[in-house]
Image (cartoon, rainbow, N blue to C red):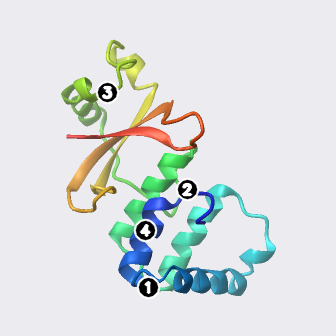
């Protein structure tokens, strides 16, 4: 989980808020969970790692709205497939999506600004999060994930928090 760097936001939150910054304690309990549930014997896909971590949080009784939101955010940053069934975000209606994009067109990456709406929505996905996953203080934020990479070496997608 740590080395793949696909769980940065959720791990920082869990370790800081539930493990008093004791990373070893967290990973020790997660390892025990893997052994108890026999996941350590199975071949696991990247998407399954998110489901397993969510199951672990439920098992440890530390699953809440913030953990689900942060886990969903990390998933969307690092994967192109839809969210696993046990993770969810509020659906955005077509009219709401249109309004959000039109109100934030000036904040879009330059390569997207000249595109008409129907073209633009092919290159981004917009989700509403219950909390701002970057600082967990702002409520109900829209985040656009773009199909361009932040860096040539990184796996995470470019994103923009919208107003």
Cβ atoms under marks 3 and 1 closer than 8 Å? no
Q: Which residue is disc 1 drawn over?
A: 61
Mark 1 neighbour class, 10 Å CA radius: few under 14, some 14 to 19, many 20 or more:
few
Q: Secondary structure at mark 1?
A: loop
Helix, strand or loop at disc 3?
loop
| Residue placed under numbered mark 2 in the picture | 6
Which residue, given by chain and number where applicable, does mark 4 sit on?
Answer: 12
Q: Foreground: 82 or 13?
A: 13
Residue drawn at (46%, 25%) of the image: 122
Residue 71 position, x and y percent, is 46, 61
Pointer 2 local density, CA inside 10 Å: few below 14, some 14–19, many at least 20: many
Q: Who's the residue at 80% across and 75% down the image? A: 41
Specify whether residue 63 is in view: no
Residue at left offset 48%, top offset 36% = 150
**Residue 68 picture location, percent across and down:** 41, 65
Location of the C terminus by quadrant is top left
Q: CA distance from mark 1 to mark 4?
A: 17 Å
Nearer to me, 11 or 58: 11
C-alpha distance separating marks 2 and 4: 12 Å
Q: Is residue 114 left or right of residue 81?
A: left
State whether residue 54 is above or below residue 151. Answer: below
Residue underneath mark 3: 108
Q: Position of residue 126 (x, y in %)?
A: 36, 39
Q: Is residue 145 visible?
A: yes
Pointer 2 or 4: first along the chain? 2
């Amino acid at each position: 989980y740590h080395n793949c760097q696909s769980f940065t936001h959720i791990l920082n939150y869990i370790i800081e808020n539930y493990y008093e910054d004791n990373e070893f304690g967290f990973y020790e309990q997660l390892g025990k969970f893997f052994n108890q549930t026999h996941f350590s014997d199975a071949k696991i896909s990247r998407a399954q790692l998110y489901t397993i971590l969510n199951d672990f949080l439920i098992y440890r009784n530390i699953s809440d709205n913030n953990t689900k939101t942060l886990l969903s955010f990390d998933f969307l940053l690092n994967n192109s497939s839809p969210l696993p069934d046990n993770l969810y975000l509020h659906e955005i209606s077509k009219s709401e999506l249109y309004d959000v994009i039109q109100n934030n067109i000036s904040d879009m990456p330059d390569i997207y600004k000249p595109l008409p709406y129907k073209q633009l929505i092919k290159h981004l996905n917009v989700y509403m999060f219950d909390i701002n996953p970057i600082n967990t203080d702002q409520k109900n934020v829209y985040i656009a994930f773009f199909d361009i990479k932040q860096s040539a070496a990184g796996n995470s997608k470019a994103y923009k928090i919208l107003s």
